[in-house]
Image: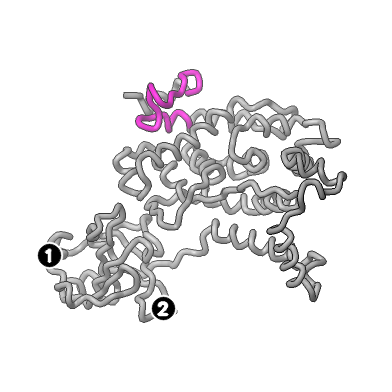
Amino acid sequence: PGTLLLLRPPADEKTGPAEEAVLIDLVPDASESLIASFVCVSKSNTYRMVTHEDVVDMALDKDPISLGGSSAQEILAQLPERSKWLRDGKGAFMVRGDDLTAEIAGRIPDLEVPGEAPEVRAQQDRVNFVENALRRHPFFDRKDKKQLLQASRIVSENPVKKSQTPKFLKQDDQEPAWREFKSCAKCLEEFGYVQNGQEVTELGKLVGALNADNSLWAGTVLLSSQVIYDMEPHELAAALSAIIVDFSRADMFVGLEPSEKVLEFVEESMDMQQRVVGAQYSNGLDFNVPLDATYSGLIEAWALGTSWAEILAMTSLQEGDVIRLMRRVLDVLRQIPNLPFVSGDMGVSPQLRLMCRRALTLMDRFPVSDDLTYTIMDHELLEDEVHLNPKP
């Protein structure tokens, strides 16, 4: 209670600015779903009962404001009866406040509307890239392109029988894995990980040793990022989660924001993400290239020593999903110190390897790691920091 929020404008003011409000309490809805409704008092002295979809931002960096002489339970007890509430969009309701809430609303400060999220800009960049590629294609200016597309659909729905396939096409049709392999080799060659079409470079061996869903993407970011060397261990763990975790859903709620350095890292990585996506696209590859800081705040808070109960209270993710998320980050943190060394200063520096061990040590706590399902060996940790997070 007392947390400052930015809510979408009321339904009858769709084009208006976001509205400042203060959280009174969370109340479960009738369906007893995991996500409760937010009961708030807006700056215009209006009771608003909204869902997480109506929350534009949470001002967690500002101190909660006082509810006056009343507790949250006392204010909830004085809510108007259900018949007086007006519907305010999907799953939301509103009703005019009273003298008690007027005094609270008067203390609500103006809040700055957050800018566009980095992941939204990254997605828009991908869309712009594909649209520009389509416009540059010779097919785009053809007047008969609709007829040709229709003909291609007809052909795909009525494939040529194998006996009618020309001999020079049969080998490629029977070996799609080989075609994908050659496309991957071309893509790796663009980044200097393969040369002469078949020889793996030192950097290529480093990237190849990294076990991730998209090793090209994760390895390239590690080798190119400058911001990552200015981070503390907890920020490094959060930053890595942004480039290796990809199971965001629109209905997920996370109430913890990552630090400024993590957001700076995400913004810095956007250009490289576009480059990797473009290289894959030009070679006919569609491997996912994640760049999403949605869960970075959870990772950072856990590395800073936040309790497991507090972590679960700040997200709608199930406990098993949170553990799986954090273990994926641990997997990468365990690998980086053991990546092959590269001559010169082009590989992963000793500084970054040491920082990964420190981050691993901070995150090595139950229930993320235990003695049965996921064990981190003592030699992977830093002895002088183990006392910060002793195992139970």
Q: Using the image, determine if residue 203 lies above or below residue 151.
A: above
Q: Badge 2: how crowded within 10 Å, few (<14), some, or many (20+)?
A: few
Q: Is residue 11 left or right of residue 340?
A: left
Query: Identity of the amino acid at label 1?
Result: Ala
Q: Is residue 264 left or right of residue 88?
A: right
Q: Give, as a single range, the part of the protein colored magenta.
A: 360-381
Res. 173 visible in picture: yes
The residue lying at 34 percent from left, 70 percent from top is 90
**Residue located farthest toward the bottom when viewing the structure as drawn:** 12
Q: CA distance from mark 2 to mark 1?
A: 30 Å
Q: Position of residue 172 (x, y in %)?
A: 80, 43
Q: Position of residue 183 (x, y in %)?
A: 76, 43
Q: Main secondary structure of the magenta part?
A: loop
Quadrant housing residue 64: bottom left
Question: Residue 186's mark?
Answer: none
Q: Using the image, determine if residue 251 lies above or below residue 306.
A: below
The residue identified by callout 1 is 77
The residue lying at 40 percent from left, 53 percent from top is 252
The residue lying at 66 percent from left, 64 percent from top is 128
Magenta run includes residue 276: no
The residue identified by callout 2 is 14
The secondary element bearing badge 1 is classed as helix
Q: Which of the pair 311/31 is nearer the observer?
A: 31
Q: The N terminus appears in which quarter of the rendering?
A: bottom left
